[in-house]
Image (cartoon, helix red, strand yellow):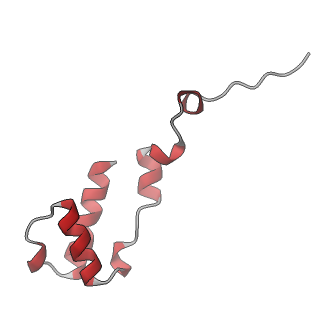
Amino acid sequence: MKEVKVASLKKFSGESDVHTPAYRRRNAPAYENWRRDDLYHLAQKRGIENRADMSNEELARALSSVQNSLS
């Protein structure tokens, strides 16, 4: 008898693994390696307040927390 493969619910519904929160956390950018001006502009796009007073580490932490909350 021929074996029939059943697609997973995600594949059947058209949702890919890329859209899952676990995938986004695993593949989150390493903000610690970014330049300050890049961090600042991304923080501006994400609406992070008081970004002008933040250090690189603080900006990276704030962006990571925003990224995690989007997941």
Residue at left offset 70%, top offset 24%: 6
Furthest residue in direction right, as rendered: 1
Instruction: Please tell me in which quadrant of the rendered image residue 57 appears.
Output: bottom left
Residue 20 pos. (x, y %)? 45, 43
Residue 17 pos. (x, y %)? 53, 44
Q: Is residue 9 above or below residue 36?
A: above
Q: Is residue 48 above or below residue 37?
A: above
Q: Is residue 57 above or below residue 68?
A: below
Residue 61 pos. (x, y %)? 25, 69
Residue 28 pos. (x, y %)? 41, 62
Residue at left offset 13%, top offset 73%: 51
Instruction: Please tell me in which quadrant of the rendered image residue 38 appears.
Output: bottom left
Instruction: Please tell me in which quadrant of the rendered image residue 68 appears.
Output: bottom left
Residue at left offset 15%, top offset 64%: 48
User: How many numbered markers are drawn?
Assistant: 0
Q: Is residue 9 left or right of residue 57?
A: right
Q: Is residue 69 left or right of residue 21?
A: left
Q: Is residue 3 above or below residue 70?
A: above
Residue at left offset 26%, top offset 75%: 39
